[in-house]
Each structure stands twice: as C-alpha cells, then as structure tokens.
Amino acid sequence: MVVIRLARGGSKHRPFYTIVAADKRNRRDGRFIERLGYYNPFAAEGEQEKGQDLVVNQERLAYWRGHGAQMSPTVARLVKQAAKAAA
C-alpha cells in the first residue's frame, strides 16, 4: 500500500520535512517513490508570508490519491491548510 507521509530531514532541533509517496512497509526516512513537496516548520517570517514554508505539488498529489494512496493525518492537515491559504 502506498502512503503519503512526511520524511524528516534537517539537523537536531531544526526539522525539515519532505512530503513523499512511499510504500507503507519502508522506514519513515527510507526509500520513497516520489517527492511531492516539503514543509519547513521553522521558516523565517518572510518565507511564511510568501507561502514558502509549505509547498505541495497538487497535481502529483491528486495522481497518487487517484491510485489509492492514503495520506497520513499530518499530511492531510497540512494539505488542507495549504488549500485554505491559497484560496
């Protein structure tokens, strides 16, 4: 089963997350199928206002959702937040 989830990167106490489509059996930060975007919770104020703290490729997200991929609760919340900010 394919799941859309966050993969953690960055350094200690400064996380940076990549939104990926991955097989559920793989590790959180391990092998993934495709990178769909990123989330930077520690983005600078100027970046947050421009919307650069969360970037999601909506076209590829819709593709994977159409092929049966499930989103993790956190990714679902972030995608909903990104859609609300774009509107």
Image (cartoon, rainbow, N blue to C red):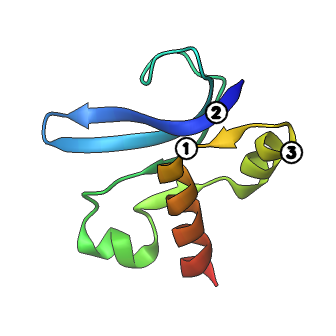
Secondary structure of the residue carrying numbered label 1: loop
Q: Quadrant of the N terminus?
A: top right
Secondary structure of the residue carrying numbered label 2: strand
Asked whether the residues under the numbered discs 2 and 3 touch, taking CB atoms below 8 Å apart as contact, a structural biologist would say no
In 3D space, how far apart are the residues under numbered discs 2 and 3 (Cα atoms)?
Answer: 12 Å
Residue in view at x 51 percent, y 61 percent: 77
Query: Residue 26, image x and y in percent?
Result: 54, 15
Quarter of the image for residue 72 reads top right
Residue in view at x 83 percent, y 44 percent: 63
Q: Is residue 32 depicted above or below 10 in this figure?
A: above
Q: Residues within 10 Å of mark 3 (few under 14, many from 20)?
A: few
Horizontally, is 18 left or right of 43 in the view?
right
Q: Residues within 10 Å of mark 1 (few under 14, many from 20)?
A: few
**Tag 1 or tag 3, which sits nearer the N-term?**
3
Under mark 2, the amino acid is Val
Q: Nearer the viewer, mark 3 or mark 1?
A: 1
- Rendered image: mark on residue 66: 3
Query: Residue 36, image x and y in percent?
Result: 62, 42
Q: Quadrant of the C terminus?
A: bottom right
Q: Residues within 10 Å of mark 2 (few under 14, many from 20)?
A: many
In 3D space, how far apart are the residues under numbered discs 3 and 1 (Cα atoms)?
Answer: 15 Å
Quarter of the image for residue 82 reads bottom right
Under mark 3, the amino acid is Gly
Residue under pointer 1: 72
Under mark 1, the amino acid is Ser
Horizontally, is 39 left or right of 44 in the view?
right
Horizontally, is 15 left or right of 12 in the view?
right
**Tag 3 or tag 2, which sits nearer the N-term?**
2
Query: Residue 11, image x and y in percent?
Result: 19, 33
